[in-house]
Image (spheres, rainbow, N blue to C red):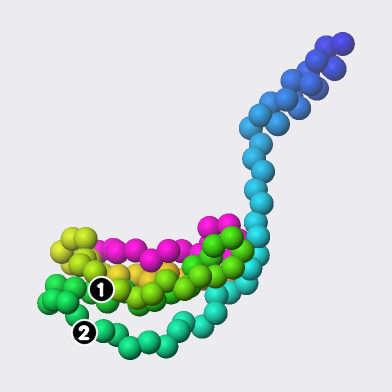
Amino acid sequence: MKKTLLAVFVLAAGMASGAIGIGISIGPPPAPRAFAVPASPGPDYTWVAGYWYPVRGRYVWHEGYWTRPPYGGAVWVGPRHDGDFVAKQQAVGHACRS
């Protein structure tokens, strides 16, 4: 009886702390689209090039745009794909310190 109770407790503890993950592979994104960069709206603006991002098992194109850096010295780091898309392996673009 004690061994059965211990086995049930160990099994329940393992299930309570376990995690389940599901990944969907959609492959690498298509090549970037060709486009002409429009004129800058002002001297403090930075161009963020267009990029593909995953939505519901397919890639959607996000057009490029002009934006102001969030703080002085920030540089734009574009999104990238690590070669095998699973869950959150498509890193989104972001600003970082130079």
Amino acid type, label 2: Ala
Tag of residue 66:
1
Q: Residues within 10 Å of mark 1 (few under 14, many from 20)?
A: some
**Magenta residues, start to end:** 84-98
54 and 15: which is toward the camera: 54
Q: Position of residue 68 (x, y in %)?
A: 20, 67
Residue at 17% across, 77% down? 41
The mark found on residue 39 in the picture is 2
Residue extending furthest toward the top = 1
Instruction: Indicate left or right for 5 with 23 as reference.
Output: right
Q: Quadrant of residue 6?
A: top right
Q: From the image, which quarter does the N terminus lie in? A: top right
The residue located at (51%, 70%) in the rendering is: 60
Q: Residue at x 27, y 76 (%)?
A: 47
Q: Main secondary structure of the magenta part?
A: loop
User: Secondary structure under badge 2?
Assistant: loop
Residues 41 and 20: in front is 41
The mark tally for this picture is 2
User: In the image, is residue 43 part of the stretch drawn in magenta?
Assistant: no
Image quadrant assignment for residue 29:
bottom right
Q: Nearer the viewer, residue 90 or 13?
A: 90
Residue 35 visible somewhere in the drawing: yes
Dot 1 amino acid type: Trp
64 to 73, vertically: above or below: below
